[in-house]
Amino acid sequence: MTASTDPIQVAFDFAKHEFKDKLKDDAVYDEVLKTTSIEQVYDFTDNLQKQQAEKGHLRHLSKIEPFLNRLEEYSKVIEVFVQAKPDIMALIWGPIKLLLQWASVLKQSFDAIVNTTAAIGNLLPEFISVTRLFSQNTHIKDVLALFFKDILDFYLVALKFFRLPRWRYVFESLWPKYKDKIEGVRQNIERHSHLLRNDVQFEHIRQEREAVLRSEGSHRRQEFWAIKTDISPIDHGKRFDSIKAQRCEGTGKWLLNDEHFAKWLDPSNNQFRLLWLQGIPGAGKTFLSSTVIERAKTCGRALFAFLSYTLSSSTSALSIFHSLIFQLASDDDDLRAIVCESVGEDLRSSTEGAVDIFKQLLAYAGFVYIIIDGLDEIEELERGRLLKYLLGLSKDCEGLKVMISSRNEADILSVLKHESTILRVDHKNAGNIQTFVNQQCQNWFQQCNFFPETETEIRGLLAPLASNSQGMFLYAKVVLSSMRWLDDIEEIRNELAALPESLDDAYGRILSRINNLQPSMVKERARKILGWIGCTPTPMTVQEIHQALKVNLEDWEGKPRVTGRIDLLRLCGPVLEVVDDYVQYIFSPNISGFINRTEVTLGLATTCITYLCQPHHDQDCSDEELQENVLGGFYAFHDYSSHTWFDLVAGCISSEEEKKLIPQLTSPLQFLLERRANNKFSRSKQVPPLPRLECFREACPDVYGMLCNVANFRRLCEGAEHSKSKDTSWINQDPLKISLVSVRIYKFMDELLCRTESHKEMCYCNTIRKYYGRRIFKCSVVDCQFRRHGFDTRSARTKHISSHTRPWKCADPSCEYANGGFVSRKMRDRHLERYHQSKESTKSFTTDSLDDDDIKPLIFDLVRANNVQAVAALLPHFKSKSYDREMVELKLASAAFGSTAMVDLLILKDGEAKTNHLASAAKANNIDVFEYLSTHFVANRYNSIAAIVSAVLSSDSERLFDACQQFLVRCSEAYKNLSALDCFAPTVVRPTAGRPHREVALMRMWDFIISNKLQGKNGLGIGFTSVASTTCSVKLAQYLISHGAHVDSRLSDRYLTPLHHAARQDSYEAAELMRFLLLKGADPHAGAGRSPKKIEDEKGPKNISKWLGKSWDALLAEAKEELGRGNPDDRSGTGSEALPTDTVAYAAEEE
């Protein structure tokens, strides 16, 4: 075997490349390679000894002699056994010379590196003697390779420390952490020395490697599953299996044969990186996606997500990346290690952090395909974010290809039209639809046993179905499904005599049939079910619906006993489907004219509240009564109602009919408070006010207080590890007794279930499954998705719950995390670094030897390292040597990179948080500090928050966005018009230019402001002017007009109208906005006292033909004609209104 293919040589080369990759410094690596022999090291140490003698502080270099002697023996041995190349020898000698050179500048560091090196030298074996003794042992080379990696690991840790900027000033506080890492290397060397000093056999080496891997692997797996459980990513695997099971034979054959698809699938073709399966609703895109996933798995790793409107409110770009990350890493030890080494909070709450981790995984994973189905079914803001990151990854990661499946929505088209290869599904799937119709007919005929002549007639009637579908599988499915409920040939003839013209017509027939159901009680039941499924904020299960139907809103003392099952699909027709016990619409819940969402939401909210007030939820239920209720199925609706009633109430008051609904809600909420108030409630010191609930304050202050406390309790539960089976003291944070009852129900049901997989005689397991579904083993953690979803077996739940443990505890017994702990070692280490730095570091930190030139860069480095104690020690010197501007920069650095303790020291100790501090935290995505500083921000007319909101929008961070909304509430309470003026300012609108997802985020923020009545006077008009003077977004302009902004909004006749602002710009966006405004009735002749030019004389109107293909006069004529056809659109407002003086600055900004 040649040297190039020798596995031992390969092991040495791998260790060398790994060392270089982890060092991440080519300059240092090149410096290392310059030293290739021990003679060069001795020359350096001799010179060093002379220099130290001259300065009178000779150190004990003789201590490292054993280390150098052992390395010399090792280098001679590997020259014989491995035929080591010069670069291998350089990696033995170069790093130790560099370390001694760097460490010699400080006596403490020099002693530390000498002592550490001496300790390792004492462990290294006598390589020449041992290898001579066991020279016939063919496996000795393997052990020599292990030693090479150990030596490089030691060098790597030490070199990384001495590469830290200005390490000599913080040596005492930082070296112990790196010394702990070296201890792990020392232990490996000790074990490997034992191997070499014995007559090592291959089995010993294998056992050693396996022992190390087992130990590390076991810890890694435990840590990985704990992180996964903590994040709870959505599992799309079951959905994939369900879709495959429903897919008819031959689905997607045309796609697999398509040349563009073949190029996208080909790993060697880098031109086709992004594929867009585009099609109308119901065209079978989801089934095609499942086909693509199967084919992609034959070429590489296939990651996927099936998105659905049923979970759109809880689906974010972050949650999708969570799913992709854990799909990719779950079966690979190396990839799991990357996840474990990530910072937990970055992965959990930051999209940017999650994408960075995902990018690292992709770099190691080889070839990967990502398939995202149903992108159009999630919120526009989230799909915009997702597309942004996926596009970036597809360009940056060579081994990645992405496929998107969705409708041709405008925002998706604007992003993908120039970036992807588009395949239009509904133009090519006619053959698949015909195959589907034939198979469904065959199944139908087998079930109904029609006579042969009847089957022939039906086939003839269905002959046009495939062509009438116009590319929509769903149309064919709905029509065929509606036939299954008919068994009379006359009814079938009547139904098929004239096929529905469209999908809406097909749905219309089904809904019309429901409206004609008799008796009326059956009709109302079917309408109620369809309404609930369309309005519920979280999907309902079959069991929950069955019990909810039994709740009598007039009977607060009743017990909703389920005595039988309703065939939901037969009652409601093919509009619904059941997936894994959850009931959902096949297509869309927005059935125009059939469901009054406000009434249905009110009805479902009242149903939940009534159910929670009924006697089976009384706190004083005896154990016997509770057991009887559990076995009687009375709590099938409990989890849904206890966790959803508040969301339903909030849904009612956000509607346009809010004022009418308040009286109808107040009465049941008062009853809930009377019956379920918790007399042991531990009231929080500060309960954040909720402006959206203000409508209850006047109607019933007690109800308002209860709702604020409930909202606060729900916030406290988010991310907490509150358990129903262990410490339940948290239940008194709930202002109601609902949590107390939930704990009792959980414990009783769990006691009634068998402890092992083999059932006891006459056990209750089947009885409980009859009422509660097959997944009866629920997770005890309140904020876990499996609290409701559950598991089929106790063992599956036990394995899951074990991952909820947080084994990595804080060492400070006074810290809240001393008991709570962290899910990963990295999270614990970061916490210790940020909040529990060694107090000795302050004592050991001296400033006597610092030059003035060193102070500024050093203190900025310390702020970035979040070394609070060292910054505190250095701060007086910095202040005495610095200008005010430099102190401002330091405060901004602390907001961006520091912890709450750091901003306490630098910002809040001498004053309050200001606009630039919060903006700096937002730009750096330092969310903890942003939230902390926001509570110390004093809102006033001189402290503008526009820059803060702008930074938040530019961050694209969901968590930061949510924190900013609460910040706006506090600001508005302190200064009523502040958030209105700042959130509609040009500075806020400008970052949305060319970024549809940011536009959606801004509109969501405006929604929040308007729904909470924070916009103040004329905020919308300010926003309209801001849009016209910056981005010229038609979407934002349309939003503002629809919410009441006047098309000619301005401060007074002295200022420009939005049309005039747009006219000052020469761009396609400005041209489109001018056209939109004119069609909305904007005055093209409105003058402005401050502007010498008329609108028509501005550059926009003069050059508009190059953008719209028509002149300004032609556009005015078109607008006049359109407006003359009917009443002009409602312009809203009153036009020129006297705005507050605070708004002048914003209006003048673009003048």
Image (spheres, rainbow, N blue to C red):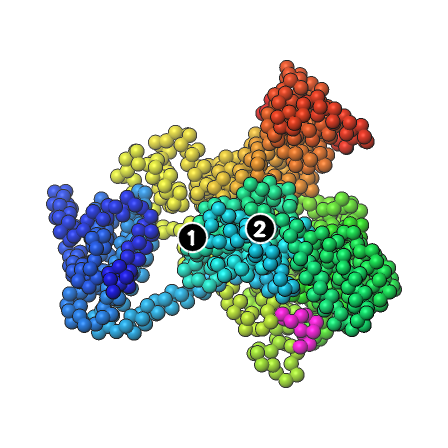
The amino acid sitting under disc 1 is Ala
Q: Is residue 997 visible to us here?
A: no
746 left or right, relative to 63: right
**Which residue is drawn at the image coordinates 69% and 62% (left, top)?**
436
Which corner quadrant of the image does residue 73 belong to? bottom left
Q: Which residues are magenta?
A: 766-776
Classify the position of the C terminus by image quarter.
Answer: top right
**Label disc, if present, on residue 691 of the rendered structure:** none
Q: Which residue is mark 1?
A: 363
| Residue 773 included in the magenta stretch of the image | yes
Which corner quadrant of the image does residue 523 belong to? bottom right
User: Circle 1 — which element?
Assistant: helix
The amino acid sitting under disc 2 is Ile
Q: Is residue 453 visible to us here?
A: yes
879 left or right, relative to 330: left
Q: Which residue is mark 2?
A: 404
Would you place residue 1131 above or below residue 238 in this image?
Answer: above
Q: Neighbour class for label 2 at 10 Å: few (<14), some, many (≥20)?
A: many
